[in-house]
């Protein structure tokens, strides 16, 4: 009922686009969830990956990407067994036997292409590249989603080599070790894009109820001038940090911009 009076202001600030895409952007969030955060050297690590509206109950499989593991010495190896199901992707790999912390990653997944335009005070969104933009409409955005989801697991004493940033794309670089997190104690991390800090970047943090009856809880923070977040988890549980960032796509990409989505799943213990 209040849409018409707000439209001029929304157009000026660009919030029409944000509101128009909010349902699509937030409808399904990517995630990677290990079967256990504490592992044995030489054991087989197993992860679920997908897109969901409620953590961590899968709705859409993550798809065929280069699932990879960063080992405690900083090396990498692929997941050797990746299975695709309708609602989730499952990946498994036997570890090399080294103690320390491993970084688990889905690798980058290119997804849907979105366009939005405004005409006559209305914003429309299209996912089908063949959908024509009406004559006289003003293009607001044109981007392809690019999603990466990660988590850390540790065999024995936590180590830090696997925590180092890659310097490529959107990522969370932990300062506090993700395998040593406790409720009501700080989790400090930085948000980076191509190795550079993102200042004023919104980070959404979710705590999963891990059951079928309850909804997850959520809160949002913004990075400081150095791209850092100081977060104190209120309760034990399994959490997910979500970052979204738009940036120009490389030459030859299917859209001029990428809509980067990065999530980090982490566990918080009781103090």
Image (tube, grey):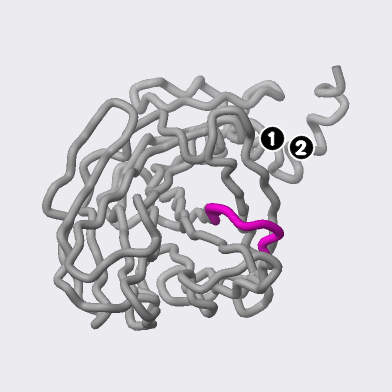
Residue 117 placement (x, y as % from top left): 56, 30
Residue at screen point 13% across, 47% down: 81
Query: Most extreme residue toward the left, as rendered?
Result: 80
Label 2: few (<14), some or many (≥20) within 10 Å?
some
261, 55: nearer the viewer: 55
Left or right, 31 with reference to 83: right
The residue nearer to you, when weighing 72 against 205, is 72
The answer to whether mark 1 and mark 2 are in CB contact below 8 A is yes
Q: Secondary structure at mark 2?
A: helix
- Whether residue 153 sits left or right of residue 201 in the image: it is left
Residue 242 visible, this angle:
no
Which residues fall within the magenta stretch? Answer: 233-242
Pick the front one: 158 or 60: 158
Q: Tell me if residue 135 can be seen.
A: yes
Q: Which residue is mark 1?
A: 16
**Circle 2 residue:** 10
Is residue 51 positioned above or below 164 on the image? above
Rendered image quadrant of residue 271: bottom right
* Magenta span: chief secondary structure: strand
- Give the image location of residue 189, x and y in percent: 56, 73
Residue at 62 percent of width and 53 percent of height: 204
User: Residue 109: percent from the left, percent from the top?
Assistant: 31, 47
Mark 1 secondary-structure assignment: helix
């Amino acid at each position: 009922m209040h849409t018409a009076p707000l439209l001029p202001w929304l157009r000026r600030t660009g919030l029409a686009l944000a509101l128009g895409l909010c349902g699509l952007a937030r409808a399904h969030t990517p995630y990677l969830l290990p079967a256990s955060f504490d592992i044995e050297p030489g054991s087989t690590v197993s992860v679920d990956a997908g897109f969901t509206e409620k953590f961590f109950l899968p709705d859409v499989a993550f798809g065929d990407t280069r699932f990879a593991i960063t080992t405690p010495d900083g090396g990498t190896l692929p997941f050797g067994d990746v299975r695709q199901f309708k609602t989730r992707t499952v990946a498994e790999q036997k570890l090399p036997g080294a103690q320390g912390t491993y970084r688990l990653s889905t690798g980058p997944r290119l997804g849907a292409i979105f366009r939005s335009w405004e005409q006559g005070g209305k914003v429309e969104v299209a996912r089908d590249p063949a959908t024509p933009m009406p004559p006289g409409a003003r293009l607001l955005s044109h981007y392809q989603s690019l999603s990466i989801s990660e988590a850390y697991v540790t065999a024995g004493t936590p180590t830090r080599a696997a925590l180092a940033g890659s310097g490529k794309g959107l990522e969370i670089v932990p300062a506090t070790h993700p395998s040593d997190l406790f409720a009501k104690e700080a989790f400090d991390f930085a948000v980076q894009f191509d190795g550079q800090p993102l200042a004023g970047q919104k980070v959404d943090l979710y705590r999963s109820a891990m059951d079928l009856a309850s909804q997850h809880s959520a809160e949002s923070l913004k990075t400081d001038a150095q791209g850092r977040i100081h977060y104190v988890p209120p309760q034990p549980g399994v959490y997910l940090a979500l970052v979204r960032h738009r940036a120009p796509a490389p030459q030859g990409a299917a859209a001029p911009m990428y809509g980067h989505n990065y999530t980090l799943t982490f566990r918080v213990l009781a103090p």
